[in-house]
């Protein structure tokens, strides 16, 4: 940091300079506010609070949601007044970065799972209020189907597990209560045989044709006739499988239909992928291997390779047998649990957030060599993987809650002798209780956990519902006693499956952990490719994202240090790193606090799930754009992009019509020019985004990440069509904007080139004008510091867009060793043409624009260089008649003479694009648009195309713009395209 106070005679100038390692642009406003406060303290002045915004508003406070949203809206937009019902977020100055901030604050404050897309589709303030009111309010009701006397006679009660699932799904309809599986085949499967196999599977297992109905407050099972599941088919490109599976897995089931299984056979080009999805009422994780073994046998039978299939046990037989067992021997187990859990806390103090936030999942960082390092502990202490992880979780909960007595749950299989080939959910929940005394070491807690787990397994058949009923703990809405926290582990050896002779391998299609929201906090551990992976799923009404990240990091640290920490006291382990400490009174937020929470440039291990998205999103994307370097490197430069008069109001109307931000408009315009510039239909560019969260707005330090926007040219190239396509690209990318760019590059591992960053040869930045600032009562007016060769060389090309209330400016900065001056000037002119096209002709093709290319760009004076196209099958007179007719139709005028000038008749740049397209079609020639500039009269253009020596020179760009403006001013109203002059 450097500072200087310069005496200008009548006033002072304050100069501050920071290295980019410690400050970014977003840190400037809080820096000045903090400097003002520190200056007052140093000067001995009383601390002055920041001015408060007027609280008055002409709009009625129609509801609490209206009031909350109005405050958040104004805070994000930094406006003094509150919004009115008709106010549009984007027309009020909102940007893509502000959208992200507003959505996050609404979700945090109101517990509303709002998405970026929701805000784009509800831009009007009143519409947004109504949407949020629906999300946070409204009763959930599920219609029930009447049960007939005949059905009651044959109905079977549901198991305790099924009743829990059924109730939970109605309480939390947004949670996912299904089991999805996907495998990649080493060849191709027969869809017809697969469908017959599934029909046979359904016929053999009653649970797969069971519907569920409610009667007198109890859930009943009714077995229906066999049915044939349809096998959905789809052709997918590489990288599309994960998105397809995620969407298919989220589709709801109708539990009263009896059709609770779905199947799909996906063609990946060189192989098939098999997808199966079951409702949790009919399948659990323990049943998954059974289903696949059965499906393999049924597939062989359907293909005519197996004559007979073995007999099986039906799920309702299991339910009845389990009920009988509880009558005869269940009391012993219930007594054990009543004694074991006597006096145990039924809930854990997990700092319920206020307001509640969205549900989520974060990864637990585990080293890749963890399995090997823990094997010695397992052998020496005679413990399992589960016992180690359970002990680490217990330590974390002891330290996090400050309690020496805690409980958490885990799922166990209730399968018994004879149940091996049965399909159906058999899991039960058991409670693990952990107590520790002062001085206990980690080894002591591990020993106690081993005994607790072994005892629990001895009594695992006691239904969890019966245990809770016996203990009768205090009940709280939305919470299950003793299992605020659960631990799920699946560390069985990975195995391959086969259908007939086609081998199946589990497809790694990303994590489903974010859907595991049945309990307040769930730790999931599984074996993937020979290494342990873990994640922490949490409900936003039970835990904040900050606390979830803290817990995930603490658990990963404990497990990582487990072998070396066995002799350490529990009290010295897992120090609590509460993110809320950053806001402690008297202490401003510190950058290291933000880094610990993953808000800095390096992100956090918890952001790793986003890497799966970026690997798919940028699969086969060009890491570098073809941008030929100049023969002689020149100076780095900054130049304005020329924009037409009145462009801003037209763009605002376009924003309102299509529901886009100014950033999306800028991205669409940039993509359009890059398509032509590079000659590629697939382009990428980068944009900086803020990673700041609520509570860290005033932190000093770089909280920026880079997001890559990938755009692929569509078939329709009107501005409106390009805008729609780019809008989707931007929305997808911004959903995962927190994933650190450096980790994305590491994951994709593109070829590296000196002085070039992959995927961001070109960058697009939205800049906001600085607000007012003061220092000890003196107003500070910012002085613009001219860019120099040294400050302009960060990227090959960087575009900056700045919007004020009545002005829009676009600046192009470029490196002189990457792009020549003529090319840069041509690119800026092309970009200006596209911005004008978006503003004034959003429904006309962009193909007609004479945009520059990197290989051959227009020179500075705008003169056309290159051969003139000639048309040999028409005479000059025929050409003149054809050209004149097209002019009349485009300009909607009745008379066009040979010497008439297109611009003098009312033509402009947009009509020139229409004319260009029409002439290329009418004359069946690849006519460059520059010919229309070089030969602006009917006669001169016809003569040139006929092969005569051209006698007209192209007008300069300035002259062309003057003519275009003259045409717009002098053009009669009746002369608009589509009006025939009548």
Image (cartoon, helix red, strand yellow):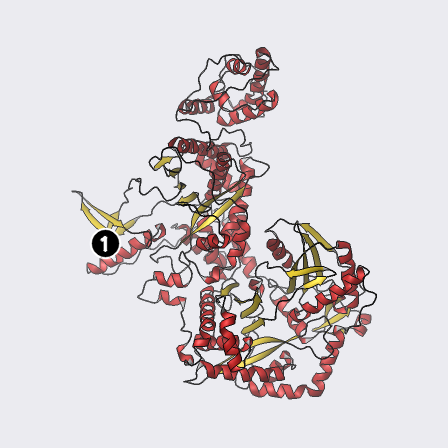
- 957 sits left or right of 465 in the view: left
Q: In the image, is residue 240 above or below residue 812? A: below
Q: In the image, is residue 398 above or below residue 93? A: below
Q: Nearer the viewer, residue 279 or 51?
A: 279
Residue for point 30% across, 54% down: 31
Evaluate whether residue 314 shows in this view: yes
- 337 sits left or right of 440 in the view: right
The C terminus lies in quadrant:
top right
Residue for point 80% across, 71% down: 310
Q: In the image, is residue 857 above or below residue 153? A: above
Residue for point 57% across, 68% down: 526
Q: Nearer the viewer, residue 405 or 685?
A: 685
Q: Position of residue 725 (x, y in %)?
A: 55, 42
Q: Position of residue 555 (x, y in %)?
A: 47, 71
Q: Secondary structure at mark 1?
A: loop
Q: In the image, is residue 710 above or below residue 185? A: above
Count neighbours of disc 1 (C-alpha within 10 A) and say few if under 14, some if 14 to 19, many if 20 or more: some
Q: Which residue lies under the disc numbered 1?
A: 776
Q: Residue furthest right?
A: 307
- 917 sits left or right of 696 in the view: right
Evaluate whether residue 127 shows in this view: no
Q: Position of residue 198 (x, y in %)?
A: 76, 61
**In the rendered image, which quarter is residue 155 located in?**
bottom right
């Amino acid at each position: 940091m450097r500072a200087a106070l310069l005496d200008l005679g009548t006033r002072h100038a304050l100069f501050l300079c920071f290295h980019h390692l410690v400050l970014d642009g977003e840190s400037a406003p809080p820096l000045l506010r903090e400097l003002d406060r520190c200056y007052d303290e140093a000067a001995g002045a009383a601390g002055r609070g920041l001015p408060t915004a007027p609280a008055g508003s002409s709009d009625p406070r129609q509801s609490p949601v209206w009031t909350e949203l109005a405050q958040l809206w104004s805070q994000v937009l930094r406006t003094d007044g509150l919004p009115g019902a008709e106010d549009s977020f984007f027309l009020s100055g909102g940007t893509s970065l502000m959208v992200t901030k507003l959505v996050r604050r609404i979700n945090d404050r109101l517990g509303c799972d709002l998405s970026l897309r929701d805000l784009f589709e509800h831009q009007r303030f009143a519409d947004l209020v109504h949407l949020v009111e629906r999300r946070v309010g409204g009763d959930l009701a599920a219609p029930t189907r009447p049960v007939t006397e005949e059905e009651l006679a044959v109905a079977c009660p549901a198991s305790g597990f099924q009743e829990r699932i059924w109730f939970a799904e109605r309480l939390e309809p947004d949670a996912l209560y299904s089991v999805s599986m996907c495998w990649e085949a080493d060849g191709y499967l027969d869809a017809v045989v697969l469908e017959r196999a599934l029909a046979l599977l359904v016929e053999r297992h009653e649970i797969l044709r069971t519907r569920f109905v409610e009667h007198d407050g109890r859930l009943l099972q009714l077995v229906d006739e066999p049915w044939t599941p349809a096998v959905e088919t789809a052709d997918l490109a590489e990288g599309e499988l994960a998105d397809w599976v995620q969407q298919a897995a989220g589709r709801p089931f109708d539990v009263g239909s009896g059709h609770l299984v779905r199947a799909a056979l996906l063609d990946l080009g060189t192989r098939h992928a098999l997808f199966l999805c079951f409702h949790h009422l009919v399948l659990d994780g323990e049943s998954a291997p059974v289903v696949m073994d059965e499906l393999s046998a049924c597939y062989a039978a359907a293909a005519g390779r197996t004559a007979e299939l073995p007999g099986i046990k039906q799920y309702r037989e299991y339910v009845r047998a389990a009920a009988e067992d509880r009558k005869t021997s269940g009391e012993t187990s219930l007594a054990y649990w009543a004694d074991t859990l006597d006096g145990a806390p039924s809930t854990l103090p997990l700092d319920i957030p206020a307001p509640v936030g969205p549900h989520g999942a974060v990864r637990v960082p585990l080293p890749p060599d963890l399995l090997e390092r823990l094997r010695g502990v397992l052998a020496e202490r005679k413990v399992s993987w589960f016992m180690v992880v359970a002990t680490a979780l217990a330590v974390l909960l002891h330290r996090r809650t400050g309690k020496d007595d805690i409980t958490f749950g885990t799922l166990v299989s209730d399968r018994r002798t004879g149940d091996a080939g049965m399909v159906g959910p058999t899991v039960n929940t058991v409670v693990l209780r952990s107590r520790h005394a002062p001085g206990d070491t980690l080894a002591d807690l591990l020993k106690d956990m081993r005994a607790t787990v072994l005892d629990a397994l001895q009594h695992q058949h006691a239904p969890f519902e019966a245990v809770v009923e016996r203990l009768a703990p205090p009940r709280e809405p939305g919470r299950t006693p003793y299992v605020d926290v659960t631990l799920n582990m699946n560390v069985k050896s990975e195995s391959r499956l086969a259908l007939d002779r086609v081998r199946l391998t589990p497809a790694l299609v990303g994590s489903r952990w974010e859907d595991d929201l049945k309990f307040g906090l769930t730790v999931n551990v599984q074996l993937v490719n020979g290494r342990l992976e873990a994640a922490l799923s949490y409900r936003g009404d039970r835990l904040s994202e900050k606390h979830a990240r803290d817990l995930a990091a603490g658990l990963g640290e404990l497990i990582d240090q487990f072998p070396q920490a066995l002799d350490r006291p529990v009290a010295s382990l897992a120090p609590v790193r509460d993110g809320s400490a950053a806001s402690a009174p008297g202490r401003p937020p510190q950058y290291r606090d933000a880094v610990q929470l993953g808000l800095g440039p390096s992100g956090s291990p918890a952001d790793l799930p986003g890497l799966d998205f970026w690997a798919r999103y940028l699969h086969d994307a060009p890491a570098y754009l073809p941008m030929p370097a100049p023969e002689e490197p020149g100076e780095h430069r900054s130049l304005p992009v020329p924009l037409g008069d009145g462009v801003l109001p037209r763009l605002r109307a376009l924003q309102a019509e299509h529901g886009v931000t100014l950033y999306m408009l800028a991205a669409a315009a940039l993509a359009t020019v890059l398509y032509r510039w590079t000659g590629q239909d697939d382009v990428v560019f980068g944009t900086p985004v803020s990673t700041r969260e609520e509570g860290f707005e005033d932190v000093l330090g770089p909280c920026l990440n880079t997001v890559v926007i990938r755009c692929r040219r569509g078939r329709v190239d009107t501005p409106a069509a390009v805008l729609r396509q780019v809008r989707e690209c931007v929305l997808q990318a911004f959903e995962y904007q927190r994933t650190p760019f450096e980790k994305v590059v590491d994951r994709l591992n593109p070829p590296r080139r000196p002085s070039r960053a992959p995927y961001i040869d070109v960058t697009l930045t939205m800049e906001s004008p600085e607000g007012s600032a003061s220092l000890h009562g003196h107003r500070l007016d910012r002085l613009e510091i001219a860019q120099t060769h040294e400050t302009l060389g960060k990227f090959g090309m960087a575009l900056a867009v700045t919007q004020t209330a009545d002005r829009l400016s676009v600046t192009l900065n470029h490196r002189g060793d990457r792009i020549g001056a003529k090319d840069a000037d041509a690119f800026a002119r092309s970009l200006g043409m596209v911005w004008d096209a978006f503003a004034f002709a959003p429904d006309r093709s962009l193909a007609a624009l004479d945009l520059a290319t990197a290989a051959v760009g227009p020179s500075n004076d705008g003169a056309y260089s290159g051969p003139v196209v000639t048309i040999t099958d028409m005479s000059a007179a025929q050409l003149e008649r054809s050209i004149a007719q097209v002019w009349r139709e485009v300009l909607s005028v009745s008379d066009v003479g040979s010497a008439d000038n297109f611009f003098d008749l009312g033509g402009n740049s947009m009509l020139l694009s229409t004319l260009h397209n029409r002439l290329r079609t009418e004359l069946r020639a690849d006519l460059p648009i520059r010919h229309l500039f070089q030969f602006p009269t009917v006669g001169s253009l016809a003569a040139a195309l006929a092969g005569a020596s051209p006698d007209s020179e192209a007008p300069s760009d300035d002259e062309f713009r003057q003519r275009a403006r003259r045409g717009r001013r002098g053009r009669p109203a009746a002369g608009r395209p589509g009006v025939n002059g009548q």
